[in-house]
Image: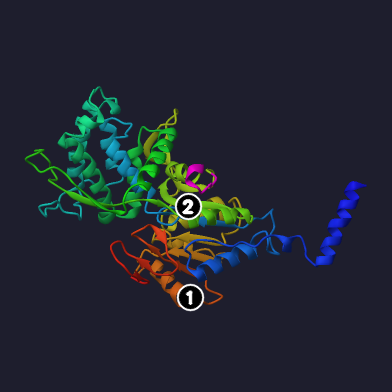
Amino acid sequence: MKRLFTGIVIAGTLLLTGCSPKQRIQLTELSGNWDPFNKKQIENLINRFGKAGDSYDPARPPYVVFDWDNTSVFLDIEEATLIYQLENLIFGCTPAVLDSAMRTGIDTSAELTEPNAAGQKFSTGKIIADISGSYTWLYDHYIGLHGGGSSSLDEVKLNPHYRNFITKVRFLYDAIYTTYSADKAYPWVTYLFAGLDSARIYEMIAHTVDWQKGEKIEKVTWTSPVDDELPGQYAGQVSVTWDNGLRLVPELQELYAKFREAGFDVWVCSASFTDVIRAISSNPAFGYHNAASNVIAMELERDLSGKILPVFRKGYIQTHGTGKTEAINRFLAGPSGRYGYGPLFIAGDSEGDQNMLFDFSSLKTGLIFNRLNGQGKLLGELTRQAVESYGKKDAKYLLQGRDENTGTLIPRQGTIRLGALTDQTLP
């Protein structure tokens, strides 16, 4: 009788109020520094297609896809990890393996577009020879590389080989990007994980994020030793500048949660290494709470013990540019994918995301974080569409600004460049 009475009371309450169970679901509201129009559009999408919407079907849940670097976080976790890896000499391979890894997929006879400090051009092979020589010295002396050395990290840092090694590896990463392409650079940097395993990557990411959160947001320049300090260098002295100060983004942490609460599945599709993205996006300490299984990113082969090999996984997709669309189709949207239908919402920031932002007819909203780039590319066209459709109900693309001096969103479409005081909307 108690159950029957309870059911009558609930039914009667719904009849008296004129509300259906679906109408009683609390509508999503976002907080933080979103542009007001962007905020409203995203809220409307969540409320229309999530649990509060009339079309919601838990058997066919809607899903969304986020890029990670410079989208879900400010700056790039793969590149921040590279700095931490270099500064702390976290490597798991012999000099011969590292040398081979650095040559993978690269024409070592090709001249790099980036010159040395004297303005001279040199080949990829020459700087790899310099890096290998310095790594061999470090391997033989630093106890942490397990090559027979007994010196501490602080001790080997005093030797010019340390500065030569870390600077030239970071220089080469940028030079491969500009000389060859992102399609070469993004897999290349993952090969430096050779000999490490997932547990070591997860530990390194946790340390990287905690370290970066306390760092000043700025550009940092490294310069390798002069010839007199370290003679016999084929590439000579080089300098490289990189961005420091990765930040977690509260608005994105909340957005991930709001999508999940409304019944959406949340995915990350990144050009970084899979373990790197899983380690930051699924670690509860970092606030995104993304399922580790919901990551589509770069994959490498592993040996029987789980150690990473400097070999891109056979048959896998490079998740950059058109590769992101291909991966989403294969694993999620295509006939053999998890869903068999496309995403409703995609967020990105760069030319590496432009294809997935454009290619899906299912897309209702594409969110672009404004880095003032993409001019002359598809990304630039999508950005222009976001500006021209601003304030219109049927706007498909949204442009979200941020302050590069603080690593935070600002309630406008424009972005404030590092060192600038005012925002700029288009490049």
Q: Which mark is residue 390?
A: 1
The vertical placement of 269 against 198, above or below, is below
12 on left or right of 110: right
Classify mark 1: helix, strand or loop.
loop
Q: CA distance from mark 2 to mark 1?
A: 26 Å
**Magenta-tinted stretch:** 284-291
- State the quadrant of the C terminus: bottom left
Residue positioned 44% across, 33% down in the render: 199
Tag 2: amino acid? Cys
Of residues 18 and 196, which is closer to you in this image? 18
The answer to whether any part of residue 418 appears in the image is yes
Residue positioned 40% across, 63% down in the render: 402
Tag 1: amino acid? Tyr
Q: Residue 409, how many percent across, how many down?
A: 43, 62
Residue positioned 30% across, 44% down in the render: 83
Q: Residue 376, how many percent across, how many down?
A: 34, 70
Mark 2 or mark 1, which is nearer to you?
Answer: 1
Near mark 1 (Cα within 10 A), the count class, few <14, some 14-19 or many ≥20, is some
Disc 2 target residue: 269
Q: Residue 57, how many percent across, how many down?
A: 69, 57
Q: Residue 151, how many percent across, how many down?
A: 22, 25
The answer to whether any part of residue 315 appears in the image is no
Q: Residue furthest right?
A: 1
Report the magenta stretch's main SS: loop
The vertical placement of 116 against 418, above or below, is above
Of residues 11 and 307, which is closer to you in this image? 11
* Disc 2 + disc 1, Cβ < 8 Å: no
Q: Residue furthest left?
A: 228
Tell me which corner region of the image, top left, top right, bottom left or bottom right, holds residue 63: bottom right
Of residues 203 and 55, which is closer to you in this image? 203
